[in-house]
Image: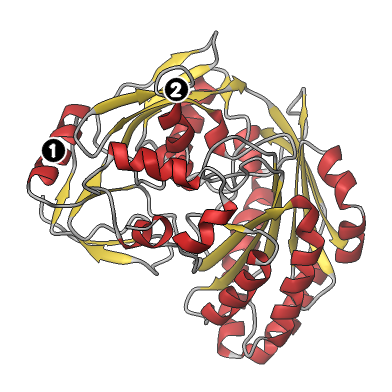
């Protein structure tokens, strides 16, 4: 296949591989890896391009897995589903709904592939839930030697501990078995609140809801809070008009236009945020779980996200506000705050601790690096762990102390990819050569 330019969703990463391959079978994936290994080349699988870092940049052999023919397998009684690693989450959600199942939790977009989502530690929000990788019951990957290797808690448990958030450094994930739940309905309560009230009552909001998050509008004292809780009946669905007005028109068309105005006239950014805060209105509805979790995202942006120990959130948030107040330019998009439970995955942001995530954004084309670097200093000082798929400036030396199993991960990588077939500039920086 002739290589073409690959770009991620945000447009801040691109590459033209020497060779682009679309394998149709696991054996073809293994053959491609063995061929690369024998000729000293490097291979990088790519998903849907929803990482902001260069984690998926392939400059030699690019593997596109959308044509991989693996028939999904659903065991409804055991609530287990096995799907191709290249399946987008939106297809997974539709597949599960057709069998009366659902993912226990999701993030706020569904464009990522399953393999890409788990490899970077993609997460939603909820005090009782870890990242999406915690729902993985097993996976198969093609290692750097071309071996087809399965891992789960009993078979190759050390690989399982590493590969559920593997950064694409251990192999090509060809299929993933996920632990699901019975399909469920969420009661969504979205409403503006003063920031001071949210921070004062935060422990109660996080503990008292299945899924709680909030968005803060910079230069204001206002937030939009989101509470999603499981209910029995889908008895209050949104009308199509209200859904279009809120999710399509206001959150995408209007937001994009306001960001363009703010970009052209930066001095107006605080006034724009205050105007946005004034027009926020409550919204209460019920919906199938994935429909309530996921929102359309058409406004392009760059993003950094840090997981800090949950107890450190007030200090981290105060530091963020100081950073924004002293920037020589304006911040045009809201700050998102979410919560996850501790887990046991070696390079998960939630490894052995409950986490609060702070996500900061800048509109497409707007200056961001001084902002992101300044907030990174705040978060790093509090033991923060950067999201692997969001922009950050950390390296292996600075990351090792934050992950107690970091060297164990490297030992698994040494065994599975001794020739560094899957290495690129990103993994060299964050894992070392």
Q: Is residue 398 visible?
A: yes
Give the residue furthest to the left: 39
Q: Which label is found at residue 34?
A: 1
The residue wearing badge 2 is 152
Residue 220 vs 261, above or below: the answer is above
Question: How many angstroms separate mark 1 from mark 2 (CA)?
Answer: 24 Å
- x and y, in percent, of residue 410 in the image: 40, 45
- x and y, in percent, of residue 229 in the image: 78, 35
Q: Nearer the viewer, residue 7 or 35?
A: 35
Residue 210, quarter of picture: top right
What element does badge 1 sit on? Answer: helix
At x 50% / y 21%, what residue is drawn? 98
- x and y, in percent, of residue 273 in the image: 73, 76
Residue 339 vs 392, above or below: the answer is above
80 lies left or right of 82 = right
Judge the density around disc 2: few (<14), some (14-19), many (≥20) Cα neighbours within 10 Å.
some
At x 64% / y 84%, what residue is drawn? 330
Q: Nearer the viewer, residue 227 or 346?
A: 346
What element does badge 2 sit on? Answer: loop
30 lies left or right of 242 = left
The first of marks 1 and 2 along the sequence is 1
Q: Quadrant of the C terminus?
A: bottom left
- x and y, in percent, of residue 284 in the image: 80, 44
Q: Which label is found at residue 386?
A: none
């Amino acid at each position: 296949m002739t290589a073409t330019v690959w770009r991620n969703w945000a447009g801040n990463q691109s590459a033209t591989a020497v060779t682009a391959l679309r394998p149709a079978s696991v054996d073809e994936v293994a053959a491609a890896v063995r061929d690369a290994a024998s000729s000293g080349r490097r291979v990088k699988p790519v998903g849907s391009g929803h990482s902001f870092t260069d984690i998926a940049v392939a400059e030699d052999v690019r593997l596109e897995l959308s044509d991989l023919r693996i028939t999904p397998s659903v065991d409804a009684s055991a609530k287990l589903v096995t799907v191709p690693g290249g399946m987008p989450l939106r297809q997974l959600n539709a597949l599960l709904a057709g069998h009366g199942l659902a993912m226990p939790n999701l993030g706020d977009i569904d464009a990522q592939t399953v393999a890409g989502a788990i490899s970077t530690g993609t997460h939603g929000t909820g005090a009782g839930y870890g990242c999406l990788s915690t729902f993985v019951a097993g996976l198969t990957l093609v290692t750097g030697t071309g071996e087809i290797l399965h891992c789960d808690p009993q078979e190759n448990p050390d690989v399982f501990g590493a590969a559920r958030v593997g950064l694409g450094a251990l192999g090509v994930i060809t299929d993933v078995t996920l632990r699901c739940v019975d399909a469920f309905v969420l009661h969504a309560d979205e409403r503006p609140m003063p920031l001071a009230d949210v921070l004062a009552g935060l422990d109660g909001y996080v503990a008292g809801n299945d899924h709680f998050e909030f968005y803060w509008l910079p230069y204001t004292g206002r937030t939009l809070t989101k509470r999603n809780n499981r209910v029995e009946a889908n008895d209050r669905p949104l009308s199509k008009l209200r859904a279009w007005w809120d999710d399509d028109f206001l959150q995408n068309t209007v937001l994009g236009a306001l960001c363009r105005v703010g970009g052209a006239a930066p001095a107006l950014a605080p006034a724009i945020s205050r105007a946005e805060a004034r027009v926020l209105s409550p919204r209460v509805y019920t919906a199938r779980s994935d429909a309530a979790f996921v929102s359309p995202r058409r406004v392009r942006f760059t993003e950094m996200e840090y997981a800090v120990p949950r107890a450190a959130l007030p200090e981290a948030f105060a530091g963020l506000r100081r950073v924004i107040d002293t920037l020589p330019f304006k911040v045009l998009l809201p700050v998102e705050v979410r919560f996850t439970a501790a887990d046991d995955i070696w390079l998960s942001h939630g490894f052995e601790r409950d986490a609060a995530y702070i996500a900061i954004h800048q509109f497409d084309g707007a200056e961001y690096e001084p902002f992101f670097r300044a907030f990174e200093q705040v978060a790093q000082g509090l033991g923060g762990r950067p999201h692997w798929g969001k922009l950050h400036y950390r390296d292996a030396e600075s990351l090792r102390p934050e992950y107690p199993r970091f060297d164990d991960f490297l030992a698994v990588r040494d065994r599975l990819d001794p020739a560094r077939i899957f290495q690129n500039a990103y993994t060299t920086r964050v894992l070392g050569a």
